[in-house]
Image (tube, helix red, strand yellow):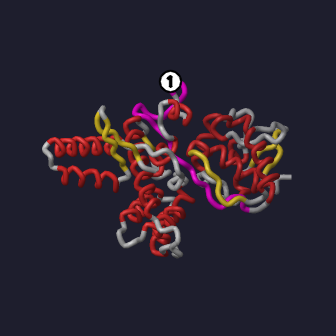
Amino acid sequence: KFMGTSEKMDGLELFDPKRMSGRILGMGDIVSLVEKATEVIDEKEANLNNVENIISIYKLKDYLNYFYVELPNSTSCLKTFSLKYLGNKMDIHCGGVDNIFPHHTNEIAQSESYTGEKWCNYFVHGEYLNDKTGKMSKSKGEFLTLSLLESKGYNPLAYRLLCLQSHYRNQLVFSYESLDMAQNSYDKLKNRIDNIKKNANTLQNLELNSDYIQEFKNAINDDLNTSSALTVLYNTIKDNKLSDKEKILLIEEYDKVLSLSLLNDDEIKLSDDEKKKIEEMIEKRNNFKKEKKYEDADKIRNELEKMGIILKDTREGTKYEVKK
């Protein structure tokens, strides 16, 4: 029934890890398992000379949490759905590091015991998201969700950028200060790309720059190094040797992986730094006008226009709007 990986003992179906030929994720150190098993197994009920064979959900509970055949659990239910709708094999399985053991070990054990073949090629486990006090938990009070961030006025894609700036294997310490910086970075990035889009010659028939595409692929192939992939994006934007159309084509390819909606026509939002710079330039222009240095004042107006900022002189003072 399970490809010879289990046996009956005292009326229970027990799992034998040795019959999996070492294929179980996180179970290479059998000695460690035995030491922990002997701490919780009642000597009267188990044969401690063969403790490797006595890994059951009843006897090792939270530590091993292996399946007891007569009692369906969440892992066996998930595996049933997976095998039915996704087939016997899977390329990539994601989850948090807290899912490695025992949840994903169980999934491997059940799948490979049932099918008799390797189930999943790659497991990708994300590290914990912490706050300054440590690991986040609902018991501590306000728990981070995307809807909470949206209610506070943050763009969820700014949070995504924050995560992409780090590696998934590294724990990420969240703070609203770091999110503010990510929000500013995202707004600046979108504005720069919007300006590139305006100047891009849509009639140009160009091929993708193979060097940049290879750089981006190398970053992703380096254990999903999204931080390096973002560096390739920024280098592309800054490269004066590329035409605006070439840049847009490359950004479109990058965003298939980054999923930051970089080319979407959203409402343009200025970062705090950008707003400060614009207001300083307007004040400088107004001073030139008072001093009747109109040529210098026009230079500032033209410079702002190149940045996508349109000035309007009104009775209440100089206003500006962002050109889409």
Foreground residue, 68 or 136? 136
Q: Is residue 26 above or below residue 41?
A: below
38 left or right of 82?
left
- Residue 281 position, x and y percent, is 24, 46
Residue at point 57% right, 47% down?
32
- Disc 1 marks which amino acid? Gly
Q: Is residue 104 magenta?
A: no
- Residue 99 position, x and y percent, is 61, 44
Foreground residue, 30 or 106? 106
130 left or right of 316?
right
Residue at point 28% right, 35% down?
317
Residue at point 39% right, 43% down?
321
Foreground residue, 189 or 81? 189
Q: Which residue is mark 1?
A: 141
- Residue 207 position, x and y percent, is 52, 76
Q: In which quarter of the view is residue 315 placed? A: top left
114 left or right of 104?
right
Is there any visible trace of residue 153 in the rendered image? yes
Read off the magenta span: 118-142
- SS type, badge 1: loop
Q: Is residue 303 above or below residue 268?
A: below
Q: In which quarter of the view is residue 74 placed? A: top right
Residue found at the very far left of the displayed protein: 291
Q: Is residue 133 magenta?
A: yes
Is there any visible trace of residue 227 in the rendered image? no
Q: Is residue 81 above or below residue 151?
A: below
Q: Is residue 287 above or below residue 207?
A: above
